[in-house]
Image (cartoon, grey):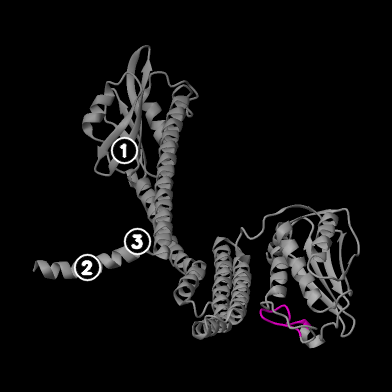
């Protein structure tokens, strides 16, 4: 039996845990509790207000009857025109004849001697308890209080009628509040019913509204479950405004970064496996031949070592280039500083002259500064300079220049080589792409222009090419003057 009860309680505990753990359920539960508390508070407040108003009205009615009685007792008999004096019974008779009790009200006159007389509405048509009536005969000061009667609670105000310090009788006005309280209770029941209806309607509306508001979270959950290294294309539809939509957009940006990171990882693996296979095979083959060669043939051994060393150097450059491309998305890729464009161009010309014997020229030297990574810009421009050297001959002109126009700075490298075919101009910035017009066999990794584009885009800029076959080529790196942060902020504002 214990096992059965445990088995039966487990689904209940899972259901309770799911109920309290689900965001929609918790929001709905909080909303229902809040609405129920508001409804209960409204009912209690309405009941309290109605009872207070009932009490105030009863007190006002009692006081009004006493004022009217005292006014009549201090006046004259309407029939004789003479003052009432000590004619107590006449005062009582005239007052009862001339006044009609209100609903639930009773007027009672108790002379010092004689039978009490009363006049009451239908709701209060009952003689008050005899013990109280006997006590009121001897009353010498005003008295108010509550009585329990067959018709329920009655509130009264008793006022003695005296002359010359002697009590002549007592005037009593009583109000039976049971009927009024029944009306109050009926009104409270109506308000409670309305509050219950509002609670049910509000719960239904909150249920569907919460589902609609939290729908992006369900999409977020489904998208997170479906994400894998092979497929990261799913995105959250976040076209509305608000925190949930912002969460969806932030999640999409995270997926963009993850997709880019996974893509870079796949490209790195593919490129490394593709480009390293050949030099490794060459090194392996020549090392095997070196082991079989004549130990006394020094020339063959030196040639093999030079070839193997060259291949290893090329693999080293290739791995370094791949690592640079892989680190391009890292926040620490750029080390920003203030760079004087003119000084940088003069430094680049000096470094270019050490690469090869060409007619190196300086186009322009702007005296403006930019916020950039000096080393990365130098690396990008020197890649362009080496590329220009590969497409020119000794003595051919190669120019480096810079300019600053408004919020954008440009540094370019132009040459007088064979130019680039139109069909090649778009693809040469891709990894391992090489043009068809090189004058010599290019031993590079095929990543030089891809690195240039990566550095330019990391600065929030771009790389542009202008070239015609037979007329040379001009590569221009354009970056924001204030650094990559300005461009990123602008892009985010446009996205919003």
Residue named by callout 1: 154
Q: Nearer the viewer, residue 494 or 423?
A: 423
Q: Quadrant of the N terminus?
A: bottom left
The tag on residue 10 is 2
Residue 493 rendering spot, x and y as whole percentages: 70, 62
The secondary structure making up most of the magenta span is loop
Side (left or right) of 4 relative to 440: left
Residue 228 rendering spot, x and y as whole percentages: 47, 77
Residues under numbered marks 1 and 2 in contact, where contact means CB atoms less than 8 Å apart: no
Q: Quadrant of the C terminus?
A: bottom right
Q: Residue furthest front?
A: 296
Q: Over which residues does the magenta segment extend?
A: 425-435
3 vs 1, front mark: 3
Packing grade of label 2 (10 A; few <14, some 14-19, many >=20) is few
Q: Is residue 403 visible?
A: yes
In 3D space, how far apart are the residues under numbered discs 1 and 2 (Cα atoms)? 59 Å
In 3D space, how far apart are the residues under numbered discs 2 and 3 (Cα atoms)? 15 Å
What element does badge 2 sit on? helix
Q: Quadrant of residue 364?
A: bottom right
Residue 340 position (above or below residue 312): above
């Amino acid at each position: 039996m214990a096992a059965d009860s445990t088995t039966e309680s487990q689904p209940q505990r899972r259901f309770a845990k799911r109920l309290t753990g689900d965001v929609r359920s918790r929001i709905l539960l909080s909303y229902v509790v809040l609405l129920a508390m508001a409804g209960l508070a409204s009912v209690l407040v309405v009941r309290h207000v109605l009872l207070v108003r009932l009490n105030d009205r009863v007190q006002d009615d009692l006081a009004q009857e006493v004022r009217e009685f005292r006014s009549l007792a201090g006046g004259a008999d309407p029939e004789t025109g003479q003052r009432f004096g000590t004619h107590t019974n006449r005062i009582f008779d005239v007052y009862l004849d001339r006044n009609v009790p209100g609903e639930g009200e009773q007027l009672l006159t108790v002379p010092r001697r004689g039978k009490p007389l009363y006049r009451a509405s239908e709701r209060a048509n009952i003689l008050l308890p005899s013990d109280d009536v006997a006590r009121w005969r001897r009353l010498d000061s005003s008295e108010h209080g509550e009585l329990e009667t067959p018709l329920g609670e009655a509130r009264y105000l008793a006022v003695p009628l005296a002359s010359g310090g002697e009590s002549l009788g007592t005037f009593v006005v009583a109000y039976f509040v049971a009927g009024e309280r029944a009306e109050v209770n009926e009104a409270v029941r109506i308000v409670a019913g309305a509050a219950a209806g509002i609670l049910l309607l509000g719960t239904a509306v909150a249920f569907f509204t919460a589902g609609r508001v939290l729908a992006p979270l369900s999409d977020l959950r489904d998208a997170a479950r479906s994400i894998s290294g092979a497929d990261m294309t799913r995105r959250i539809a976040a076209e509305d405004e608000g925190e949930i939509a912002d969460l969806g957009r932030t999640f999409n940006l995270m997926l963009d970064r993850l997709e880019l990171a996974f893509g870079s990882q796949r490209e790195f693996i593919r490129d490394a496996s593709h480009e390293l296979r050949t030099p490794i095979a060459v090194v392996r083959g020549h090392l095997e031949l070196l082991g079989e060669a004549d130990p006394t043939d020094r020339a063959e051994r030196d040639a093999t070592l030079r070839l193997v060393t060259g291949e290893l150097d090329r693999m080293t450059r290739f791995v370094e280039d791949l690592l640079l491309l892989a680190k391009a998305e890292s926040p620490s890729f750029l080390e920003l500083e203030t760079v004087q464009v003119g000084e940088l161009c003069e430094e680049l010309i000096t470094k270019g002259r050490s690469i090869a014997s060409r007619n190196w020229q300086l186009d322009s030297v702007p005296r403006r500064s930019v916020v950039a990574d000096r080393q990365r810009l130098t690396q990008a421009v020197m890649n362009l300079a080496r590329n220009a050297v590969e497409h020119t001959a000794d003595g051919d002109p190669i120019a480096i220049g810079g300019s600053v126009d408004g919020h954008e700075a440009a540094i370019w490298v132009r040459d007088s080589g064979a130019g680039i075919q139109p069909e090649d101009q778009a693809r040469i910035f891709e990894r391992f792409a090489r043009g068809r017009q090189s004058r010599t066999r290019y031993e590079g990794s095929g990543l030089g222009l891809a690195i240039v584009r990566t550095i330019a885009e990391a600065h929030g800029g771009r790389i542009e090419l202008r070239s015609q076959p037979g007329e040379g080529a001009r590569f221009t790196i354009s970056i924001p003057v204030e650094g990559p942060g300005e461009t990123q902020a602008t892009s985010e504002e446009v996205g919003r």
